[in-house]
Amino acid sequence: MEDVIPSEIIKRVIRWWWLVLMIMIAGGAVGILAVKLQKPVYESQASITTSIDFAYAGRIDEAQEDALISVVGDEIGSTLVMDAVKEKAAALGITVTDETIKERFSKARQGYRWELTVRGNDPQTTQALTQIWVDAADEALIKFNAQTQEVLAMRSAQLALQNCFSQTVIVDPASGYCSTENLATIREVLAQTSTTTKLSSLPDAILLSNISTEVTDDAYLPTHPVLLKQNLSTLAGSICGLLIGLGFLILGKNQK
């Protein structure tokens, strides 16, 4: 076998450039065809928008704002919500597993908005699963807001109880502000809110109590499949075609 001379290869490539180009185009076409032959994948999307009541939350920095919106995202993708999705989907005859959720369910943040995306091979099923997810997330967020209000009431009652007890040891007219009736009322509030299992600090509870969420876009019915990785497949096919063309020219020279 003769040694490979770069200058000779360059001359052959220049001479047969059209052949290399055709092989590259053919490789790219094969890549596109490979994508087309796969099962069609449809994508449906819905969105939930977060609102912050700055009139009551006060001035907060960007880190706190991001943290509040991230809390909403964590709730949307929580195990509780996904279990509800699987249960509601099963009621409609749709099987959803943890592997399905991992591969086909995704959420992405766009400013104050969380976009919930589901992909599947059937457009109606894909839309149904997306709507189930956004509805389950909305229900969970409503409950979360109610729990946050409960935490705020609990923390406020605890603070009032501490102040009340501190006043009882002072023998002056100020102790009259903490009467037996006050203690009984505070204890009643604490008893009503004692079911809360996870308590936040008072500042966190105040911030969380001033966020609200709303489903701003319901799931839509996809009409066309998405072309997943078509550009990558086309590029890979073209590169393979280029390598095949160059290999053909090199081997053709060496066989002479």
Image (cartoon, rainbow, N blue to C red):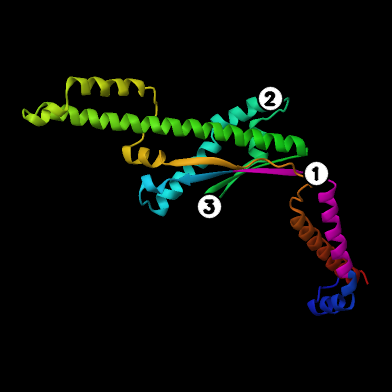
Q: Are marks 2 and 3 in contact (CB under 8 Å)?
A: no
Compute the Cα span from label 1 to label 3: 31 Å
Q: Which quarter of the rendering shows the C terminus?
A: bottom right
Residue 199 in view of the camera: no
Residue 53 at x, y percent in the picture: 42, 45
> Mark 2 or mark 3, which is nearer to you?
3
Residue range corresponding to the magenta coloring: 20-47
User: Residue 40 has which mark?
Assistant: 1
Residue 178 at x, y percent in the picture: 17, 26
User: According to the image, label 3 marks what residue?
Assistant: 111
Name the residue: 79% across, 58% down: 234
> What SS does tag 3 mark?
loop
Q: Quick one: label 3, few (<14), some, or many (20+) residues within 10 Å?
A: few
* Residue 198 highlighted magenta (yes or no): no
User: According to the image, label 2 marks what residue?
Assistant: 90
Compare residues 18 and 149 and report the one nearer the observer. 149
Residue type at mark 1 is Pro
Name the residue: 74% across, 56% down: 232
* Residue 21 highlighted magenta (yes or no): yes
